[in-house]
Amino acid sequence: MAPPVPATGAATVRDREGGAGLADPLLAYGSGATKETSAADGKYWVAADDADRRALEECAGEDGRPLLFRSYRLRGAILHPYRALIFVRLIALLLFFVWRIRHNKSDVMWFWTMSVAGDAWFGFSWLLNQLPKFNPVKTIPDLAALRRHYDLPNGASKLPGIDVFVTTADPVDEPVLYTMNSILSILAADYPVDRLACYVSDDSGALVLYEALVEVAKFATVWVPFCRRHCIEPRAPESYFELEASPLTGRAPEEFVNDYKRVKMEYDDFRARLDSLSDTIRKRSDVYNSTRASEGDARVTWMANGTQWPGTWIDPTEDHRKGHHAGIVKVVVDHPSQGLRDGPDADAENKCNIGATGACLPMLVYVSREKNPTYDHNKKAGALNAQLRASALLSNAQFIINFDCDHYINNSQALRAAVCFMLDQRKGDITAFVQFPQRFNNVDPTDRYGNHNRVFFDGTMLALNGMQGPSYLGTGCMFRRIALYGIDPPHCRPGNLTAKSNKYGKSTLLIDSVSKAIEEERLTTPPPLDGTFLTEMGMVVAASYDKGTEWGKGVGYIYDIATEDIVTGFRIHGKGWRSMYCTMEHDAFYGTAPINLTERLHQIVRWSGGSLEMFFSRNNPLIGGHQLQLLQRVSYLNMTVYPVTSLFILLYALCPVMWFIPDEIQIQRPFTKYVVYLIGIVLMIHIIGWLEIKWSGVTWLDYWRNEQFFIVGSTSAYPVAVLHMAKKLLTKKGIYFRVTSKQTTADTNDKFADLYEMRWTPMLIPTVFVLVANIGAIGVAMGKALVYMGVWTGAKKTHAALGLLFNVWIMVLLYPFALAIIGRWAKRPIILVLLLPAVFVVVAVIYVALHILLANIIPI
């Protein structure tokens, strides 16, 4: 494969004087309009901040702070019909509900009662989901304005510091190569290296991850200069080298090709070293143990420098196993002003440059908090809080952004984009966090299981920009440090605020750093690692540090809930802060999604279970968050109760079993009117959805996959989450935290091999039953039509046709699940299209045959 040449879009380092490319889609042209303006200020969106900009021009920017993002609102031509349709459907729902109560006639009254309750809940949950979308607002960062005001002519910068957190829990389920690519993309990001630090949290305490970081530090001295010199996008090498081709920059291709070949060779060597790390560590440890240990002694895991690894050992012992090991903080690459401390001894050529571009790297720190079986580790939230405290002692950056280990920076200017919102003159001071949409690069082209979830990311989250802002979504989110510390926004904050030990713990250095963070003081260089500092560092990553403090309650990431993200955002919004949603034409980050159905559903169980846990906690949106705006509260309420909807969907999805009963059973009389009303109400949902598709920019396929997977989840994962919640209320045991496996099926010839592997689990039983019931019901309906068509009245034929329409609709929605069942045959979906009608015919024939055989015994 020919080497891909660097992307045109990354004109960042060498083109600071005003140039902009595709990777800078939001950089302003000379007139001040952004490149995305043509889309945002076109058919559906119109600028909403012209008055702010005129006011700034009139006062000539007296306070010295510029406007760093553009705001757009929906044009009235689409906003007014959209709002009117929501209102009309609300009226239609109320009339439908009243009609059902007045015509309380049914063949099965208990089922009628359940269906009325279900319809009432469907209407209520739809309203919770729809009301927060009443005022969509799009916000686009102005990177050119940021450069003009914060990048100095001499190459220095006035930008604030950023601490980047990467969390990983298991080097097997979360492959080391993914994690290292994430870190390399961070080290190569377009941000001043002296104001950027990367903290990697390893909850497994495995030596292989630390030594992988050492290898990263070596390879980064080649990779980072290559990216800066040739404006490479993306800056995760695994993704970059998979590119087939990219457009040229202005540099000579021969020079680039030479650098490319060298860096590609270095990366292949780097990958080989990562692949062999586990064997290298085991062989080294075997050698050390054979020469230093006596018979019967524990088999120690040894570091490359001949010292014992304080974390998890390959052959675990009581104090060196997963879940029980010492806390570890190691600076792999120090602050650029101090060089390397614990890092690798890179050769002079690599440490300096490729060509004329320097290889100074941001600070890189390995963190593995102490684990002890006598303390609750509080899952990912506990790991993030340990990173938060460790970073406070070392760099104490004003802003923090966290990533899951499988996410990498796809747009090297993404960090700058988030800073635009934090430093803006209008809302910067009250912006607690900036959330980016999640994007994935390993999803199958048809997105069978709705992994992209664009209806949520590009619709719901964008709409929340019109209120207090989007919720925190777990990854790709930049925080203001003091907001995580539980500090109120400036307009609500008391004077002379001091940090106290009963809130933040007994570390004096940490309390001092909190005070400095409140005053927005930053460390220009990390403190010396003397004995006192190391003692304090060990204290803040200790398993017992949270005890007796506000950590996990009102400070940091919130504990006691399976998903820490929504509740952490809720706690911050509840104090009066706002958040912003940042979309970029060239996606900011990419991650890895579970394309296997079972793994995807396990992920859904954890998310939805955590949402229910939040509802039944002191962070219930009905009672918590005294500074929440009304519609923001409605939004959080919707996020915490939506799994309950699945119980009623499951009930309706099982209705087709009525076809197996000889007599006609009607849920509601008059049945025809009832079904026509239902069809009208459902159609109105999709008309509203069509308007959302228009203004959010999602496709019909995205919308349809969202509908399909919600039904699949509603017959499997969501009911399981509800059962888990019921179990917790009875037993006080929370949702089990299962790390979503990122390992793929060993099939080098098929990128999507995981998609076609069916891993059976008990949660799939209801979905299988619903699918089989609907297949059987359609077959029986065809059989009944053949037997009774001559004796059925017109009304019965109409009822049968309407009931069959519902069966077919359920089948269409369960289509992705049916594909999952047939495994690798699903590579040719036409097989399923041919197979299902054949099964319908077989069932119909069986029914007719049974009817003929048993007609004289029982009516069928």
Image: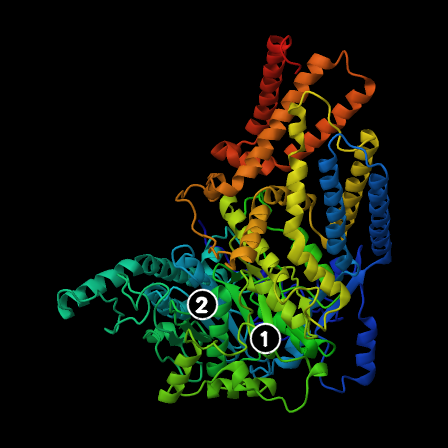
Label 1, secondary structure: give it: loop
Name the amino acid type tagged 2: Asp
- On the rendered structure, is 302 left or right of 417? left
- For mark 2, does the 10 Å Cα neighbourhood hold few (<14), some (14 to 19), or many (20 or more) residues? some
* Quadrant placement of the C terminus: top right
Viewer-proximal residue among 701 and 188: 701
Q: Is residue 673 visible?
A: yes
For image coordinates 61% across by 16% down, the residue present is 847
- Residue 536 location in percent, x, y? 41, 84
**Residue 354: quarter of image:** bottom left
N-terminal-most mark, 1 or 2 = 2
- Residue 43 location in percent, x, y? 80, 54
Viewer-proximal residue among 614 and 701: 614
- Residue 396 location in percent, x, y? 52, 81
Alpha carbon distance from label 1 to label 2: 17 Å
Q: Is residue 402 above or below residue 2?
A: below
Q: Can residue 247 be seen in this view?
A: no
For image coordinates 62% across by 10% down, the residue present is 857
Q: Name the residue under label 2.
A: 376
**Residue 773: quarter of image:** top right
Viewer-proximal residue among 141 and 111: 111
**Residue 307: quarter of image:** bottom left
- On the rendered structure, is 720 left or right of 149? left
Label 2, secondary structure: give it: loop
Q: In this view, does 106 lie above or below 409?
A: above
Q: Residue 340 carries which label?
A: none
- Residue 122 location in percent, x, y? 73, 47
Name the amino acid type tagged 1: Gly
For image coordinates 48% across by 42% down, the residue present is 761
Q: Mark 1 points at which residue?
A: 554
- On the rendered structure, is 388 left or right of 473? left
